[in-house]
Each structure stands twice: as C-alpha cells, then as structure tokens.
Amino acid sequence: MLEIRIRQKYNVVILDLSGRIDVDSANLVEVVGQCLRDGYVDILCNLEDVEGIDYMGISVVAIAYKEVANNEGRMKFANCPSHLRGVFAVSGMDRTIELYATDDLALNSFKEDKAIENIKKMQLRRRFKRLPIDLKIELKSKLENSPHCLKLDILNLSAVGAFIFGCDKFKLGDEVILKMKLAPRHEEFDLEAKVVWVPNKEVQPHEYPGIGVEFRNISAGDQQKLIAFIERNLSFTSLD
C-alpha cells in the first residue's frame, strides 16, 4: 500500500510518497482531496521512495492531478527515479505533469508561478479603464447569516473590480455578492467578487471604511456591458 507522509513548506503541501502507486493507492486521491478542502491548492509529490508505478497507478495520479487543477491549484512532482520516468514517458504523462530534480527546484517554481500570475493580473487590470463614479449598490456575503451592507457607494469601477465605500464589515479574502443597476436601462447585475484590498484607517483615512473587490466568475456578457457603460460615461466626462 502507498504510504503518504505530509509536511508543509512555503504554503506548499509536500506529500512524501513511499511504496507502490497502483490500484490500491486511492489514498493519494483522498489525501489530495483533504488538502484542497483545507485550503491548500499547491501540492508537491516527492517520488524519491516510490518503488514502482503501474498503469492503474498512472490513472490514480491523473485523477489527483485533475482534482487539483479543477480547484485552480497546482500539483508538481520532484525526485522522480529513472524507473518511474520511463512509465511516465510511455504513458505520455510526462507531457502533462511537471517533474523537478529536487524539492527546492519544485518549490521555487511555485514562487515563480505566483510572480508570473501577479504580473498577468496587473497587466489585465491595466487593460481596463477605470471610471470615477458615485453609484449606489448593495453588498452581502456569499455565506448565509453573514455581513450585509445596503446603499453603499462605488467610487471607482472597472470591468474587473471596484472600490466600494461605506462598509467595514468585510475583511481581506471575503467572498461577496455585489448588486447594482446601470443606467440607462437600469439593468440589474449580481456579481461575485472577492475582497482584495482593505485601507488602513490610520494611513488612508480618506478611503476608510472601504474595500477593493475583484470580480470573480464574471460572464463575458456582463463584462462587455460594464466595459460599454464605462466607455460611455468616460466619453461624457471628457466632454465636460
């Protein structure tokens, strides 16, 4: 049976595997699933002490890998012995997974991925124009029986996020639902968002109480409507 020892480094869960990965290795999928439920989406499998893997074992690895990917996480592999590399190559799995010679190289790759991801997010934000505006909205938590704020003000709106003023009930990382209507049709939007910035009351008193949110799972249609609304109002502003 596959034995799994769990440790953690730099917010990455490392699974030290030993034994064989085969039809009896469903515990790998179970452990990975528990890591995801606990909020750990970066997972590194240390293969150094794995004695062998058969084609059923390849299927187990593929299921675990897909589960991580479906949860927007990353699963990587380190210290892969030569006898495992051969099986990964024959099965084509080596074209899907990332194999690293050492733990340190794999851990550094997680850091590099995050840096690249942050750069891409910054570039994405810069692609969309921001509209200074005073727009009344309603904001509530995605969780039942959690904070609810009525008649807040959006002071800055883009197609990827907004700055909302007037509520101090939410903290960094909270997931919320933002309800608003846009002129001229007063079409109602229910947008999922995540709190990504909270001003410091002492350092940024003019922006407190407020939060910066990033829209999540926004449909292409809703985003296009936001872009059209922002472009239209920016053009009116430029005529003033």
Image (cartoon, rainbow, N blue to C red):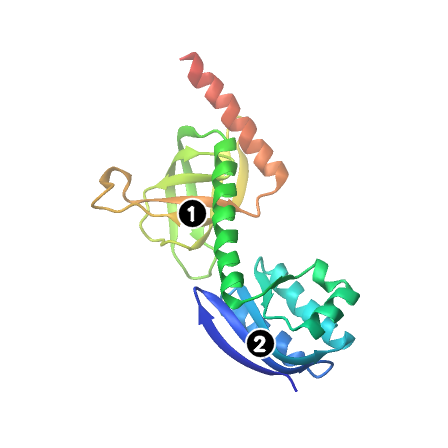
For the point 43% across and 15% down, the residue is 238
Position of residue 89 measured from the top left corner of the image (x, y, whole percent)? 75, 65
Residue at mark 1: 139
Q: Relative to the observer, which residue lies in front, 172 or 125?
A: 125
Which amino acid, mark 1?
Leu
| Above or below 180: residue 227 | above
For the point 46% across and 61% down, the residue is 144
Task: Give the mark count.
Answer: 2
Position of residue 170 measured from the top left corner of the image (x, y, whole percent)? 36, 53
Q: In which quadrant of the rendered image does the N terminus lie?
A: bottom right
For the point 50% across and 35% down, the residue is 181
Q: Which residue lies furthest to the left in this view?
A: 202
- Can residue 185 be seen here? The reply is no
Which amino acid, mark 2?
Val
Relative placement, left or right, of 23 versus 38 is: right
Secondary element type, mark 1: strand
Disc number at residue 231? Answer: none
Q: Residue furthest front?
A: 82
Relative placement, left or right, of 63 versus 214 is: right
For the point 43% across and 51% down, the residue is 140
Q: Relative to the observer, which residue lies in front, 104 or 224?
A: 104
> Between tags 1 and 2, which lies in front?
2
Q: In which quadrant of the rendered image does the C terminus lie?
A: top left
Secondary element type, mark 2: helix
Position of residue 37 measured from the top left corner of the image (x, y, whole percent)? 53, 69
Q: Which of the 4 quarters of the picture holds residue 173?
A: bottom left
Callout 2: 10 Å neighbours few (<14), some, many (20+)?
some
Q: Relative to the observer, which residue lies in front, 19 or 180?
A: 19
Disc number at residue 31? Answer: 2
Which mark is first along the chain, 2 or 1? 2
Q: Relative to the observer, which residue lies in front, 124 or 199?
A: 124
